Amino acid sequence: MSYSEVYQKACRNPEEFWAEIAENVHWYKKWDKVLDDSDKPFYRWFSGGRTNVCYNAVDLHVEEGRGEQAAIIHDSAITNRQQTITYNDLKAETARFAGVLKAHGVGYGDRVVIYMPMIPEAVISMLACARIGAVHCVVFGGFASNELAIRIDDCEPKLVVSASCGLEPGRTVEYKPLLDQAIGLARHKPDHCIVLQRPQAEATMIDGRDIDWTRAMQEAGQVECVPVLATDPLYILYTSGTTGQPKGVVRDTAGGIVSLKWSMKNIYNMEPGEVYWAASDVGWVVGHSYIVYAPLFNGNTTIVFEGKPVGTPDPGVFWRVISEHRVKVLFTAPTAFRAIKKEDLHGDFIKKYDISCLESLFLAGERTDPDTLNWAREKLGVPVIDHWWQTETGWAICSNCMGIEALPIKEGSPTRPVPGWQLEALDEQANAVKPGDVGALVVKLPLPPGTFPTLWNARQRYMDSYMNTYCGYYETGDAGYIDEDGYVFVMSRTDDVINVAGHRLSTGAIEEVLASHPDVAECAVMGVADALKGELPLGCLVLNAGVERDEREIVEECIRLVREKIGPVAAFKLATVIKRLPKTRSGKILRGTMKKIADHAEWNMPATIDDPAILDEIAESLQKLGYAGA
Ligand code: COA
Ligand code: AMP
């Protein structure tokens, strides 16, 4: 069938479409209802069914004869080590770690926070939770204690799984002190922490609370998969909202299995047994969906990569991994390619390796700029597919579906909506805009399986943030247009979320931290263009009257404060002191105009500004800062 035929089929009768696909997964009990719409807009897929994520990801393949196939290849470019874990090994390790969890009181519905670097034990921990019906919440290692504490308080885990350290180029990040500090800050105290001691740093353990991973694994028995409800939560993954309180995106069990398994063939054109590599981190949604779950549901080999696109040790590391492990599809963020291109413009490192196994490159996390797209396509000689999705959606809203029909590529567009997604661009009155005109990108409800049925502990926030603005639609928070051919162009966010190196950050959360500095009266943070990371946060600080300290010292303190409170991942390094913030007469900060000034883009004097002279002062301050724009 062509793309259009599959797309139309999914639109005509979503229940029939997804029920047919759901036949390809393992069920202990089939669903009573394909789509339960009794509590709109909280739609539930496959309600009444019983299944298990870990069984579908691991045990099923062992039973079907894939036991000797590699399930995970851990390639640590930082330590120069590689390890292959077969499906047989993965089943044994996961069953044993599920035994460890159970022995320490974790059961069905309990939450487990996982704070780990890119090592196989992170994947084993996630699968072990799924095996016993516990809900995991992975927290990215680049977040500081305070962010970890916020997540601990929100999801109230029974237990935390961690490692003694993560490895960044040239730096060992000790996780255990960060974890101890987070538990100190949090109101909720987990009963236990299971800690994997890595040779690069030894964690100090707290008697009675902390448990050594290796010893616990030696003592534990293996535990079988537990049938859980199709609608039970598999995980919570926090993502940036407009405030300092992140949103706990919930993913449910069956929807995730059905949609992700389908996506492997239909979007990425992967057959079971082939090697797939998502060069991201398990702490992000890409890591959940495409390092861990989708490739395993589909019986693929997944690469768990500990390293960076450059500097570990050189810009050839991606090509080495592809050629050594015979990777068919690579998925990463455009920023990784910009980093490689910067260091190897002519692609000399690519020529050193045989990457003939690579069939396509998928990019997401931010819009793929035409320069990056063309460079990658020319140097790799494979299709480069931009696809658009979000933590909330769990898988792609728009993509060129390579397993259905490869459509012509248009630069700057993630192609057309994936079957299952009915996308529209609307104006403020909820009318469809003309093809080519920019509007809010919204998805007609119900969302397909595998998306987020709610936010953890925040039903009303789910409504307010996503469902209330356009009745009957999910508001993506992205603006863009759909052209005459149905191609989608995602242009910008409609909220205060910025995108730094493919990571989503809240300017509001950074502003909250800056405002807590005793000398700061007011501040504004915006995302300014950066040639490598896409955007970087820039802070404009207004000091309290009477502060006479050296401004540079205050700026340094503010930068340190953001690193301490949010973490290095915020990449907050640009800040300047200004006299006043430009505001409209009604008091709204003119962030958009400030951003244009910072980016050296064209800007017009806003008609509603209360004091036009202030913008010249800001331009002068930004010039002094030395930020050159992209
Ligand atoms: N644990 C602790 N610290 C971490 C971390 C982790 N897991 N991941 C990143 N950090 C730190 C980095 O060390 C860096 O600290 P620094 O300010 O002391 O240098 C900071 O957080 C910013 O990290 P990063 O955004 O990775 O920047 P970088 O300069 O180290 O690397 C790129 C730049 C482009 C190479 C890198 O961002 C990259 O590979 N991006 C790929 C994109 C990606 O994976 N996106 C996920 C969605 S698909
Ligand atoms: P996250 O939830 O962290 O995955 O970030 C999702 C956001 O990243 C989206 O809402 C977009 O703003 C942006 N994004 C992701 N992929 C793309 C893409 N292919 N094109 C444009 N923006 C993208």
Image (cartoon, helix red, strand yellow):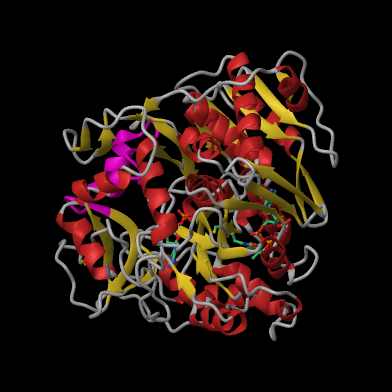
* Residue at position x 48%, y 41% in the image: 237
* Residue at position x 66%, y 65% in the image: 322
- Front-lying residue, 537 or 314: 314
- Front-lying residue, 409 or 298: 298
Q: Quadrant of the N terminus?
A: bottom left
**Residue 563 belongs to the span the image colors magenta:** no
* Residue at position x 66%, y 25% in the image: 184
Rendering quarter of residue 26: top left
Q: Quadrant of the C terminus?
A: bottom right
Count of numbered tags: 0
172 vs 100: above or below = below
Q: Could you tell me if residue 577 is visible in this image?
A: no
Quadrant containing ligand 2: bottom left
519 left or right of 137 in image: right
In x, y percent, where is residue 272?
A: 50, 53
547 left or right of 22 in image: right
For the view shown, which residue lies furthest in the front direction?
65
Magenta stretch? 448-474
**Residue 459 belongs to the span the image colors magenta:** yes
- Front-lying residue, 596 or 481: 481
170 vs 564: above or below = below
In x, y percent, where is residue 506?
A: 49, 53
